[in-house]
């Protein structure tokens, strides 16, 4: 892995806009969570790829919160930003806002953190550029990300009792 030039988060900020149509809504006329998660994944992946200029895969998505519903007919704006870059992985933060097309009112509806890993065509991990923090807020967020990374990896390593419960075979009848 060769040394790479550090990049600023502002170099890879990614925004995308969708229109919430009935096909992405539940029976209450509000966004289906899986559709929003798919958009979040795409917006964050583009951001991560802009940072490292490599192909990336999603390693995890967490801190996913649906703060408010998005109703059919609303414009949906997603914004993704690199929070931290490690060795081959990057933590990306995404926010989702709904926008009323008639009044322009915007509301935070969803937020999430995703980790992407850069891979070459053979699936080998690649080093990603470091993140150049330009403000105290960015430095603080990156420091928090280091703790979150350790926590994620420890939870993955430990496994969880719920995994065993979900994977267990149904009882014989
Ligand atoms: C993500 C993946 C590449 C990790 O591979 P691995 O061999 O388990 O990873 P390693 O232990 O070598 O860690 C590689 C990096 O991934 C990070 N990582 C691994 N698992 C992670 C997880 N669950 N969450 C966050 N980061 C993770 C590590 O911190 C490490 O980052 P670093 O290089 O910056 O320190 C591998 O599990 C994979 O290919 N998963 C499937 C990805 C995919 O198909 N995504 C689409 C989902 S539909």
Image (tube, rainbow, N blue to C red):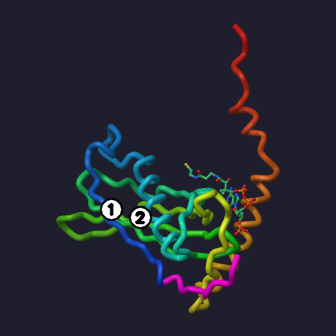
Q: Is residue 24 visible?
A: yes
| Quarter residue 164 falls in | top right
For this view, does 18 lie left or right of residue 34?
left
Q: Is residue 115 visible?
A: no
Figure check: 124 above or below 80: above
Q: Closest to the observer: 111 or 85?
A: 85
Q: Residues within 10 Å of mark 1 (few under 14, many from 20)?
A: many
In the image as oriented, which residue stretches furthest toward the left? 102
In the image as oriented, which residue stretches furthest toward the top? 173
Q: Closest to the observer: 51 or 167?
A: 51
Give residue 28's position: percent from left, percent from top.
32, 41
Q: Which residue in the structure is indicated by mark 2? A: 96
Give residue 18's position: percent from left, percent from top.
30, 60
Q: Which mark is residue 150?
A: none
First to last magenta residue range: 1-10
Give residue 54's position: percent from left, percent from top.
54, 69
Residue pictured at 27% horizontal, 57% vertical:
19
Residue pictured at 73% horizontal, 27% vertical:
168
Let me know if residue 88 is in the magenta part. no
Q: Residues within 10 Å of mark 2 (few under 14, many from 20)?
A: many
């Amino acid at each position: 892995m060769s040394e790479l030039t550090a990049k600023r988060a502002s170099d890879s900020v990614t925004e995308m806009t969708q229109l919430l149509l009935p096909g992405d809504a539940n029976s209450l006329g509000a966004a289906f969570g899986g559709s929003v998660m798919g958009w979040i994944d795409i917006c964050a992946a583009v951001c991560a790829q802009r940072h490292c200029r490599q192909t990336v895969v999603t390693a995890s998505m967490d801190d996913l919160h649906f703060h408010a519903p998005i109703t059919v007919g609303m414009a949906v704006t997603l914004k993704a930003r690199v929070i931290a870059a490690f060795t081959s992985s990057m933590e990306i933060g995404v926010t989702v806002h709904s926008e009323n097309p008639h009044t322009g009112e915007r509301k935070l509806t969803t937020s999430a953190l995703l980790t992407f890993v850069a891979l070459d065509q053979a699936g080998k991990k690649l080093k990603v550029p470091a993140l150049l923090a330009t403000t105290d807020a960015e430095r603080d967020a990156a420091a928090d990300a280091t703790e979150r990374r350790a926590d994620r990896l420890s939870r993955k390593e430990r496994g969880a009792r719920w995994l065993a419960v979900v994977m267990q075979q149904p009882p014989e009848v």
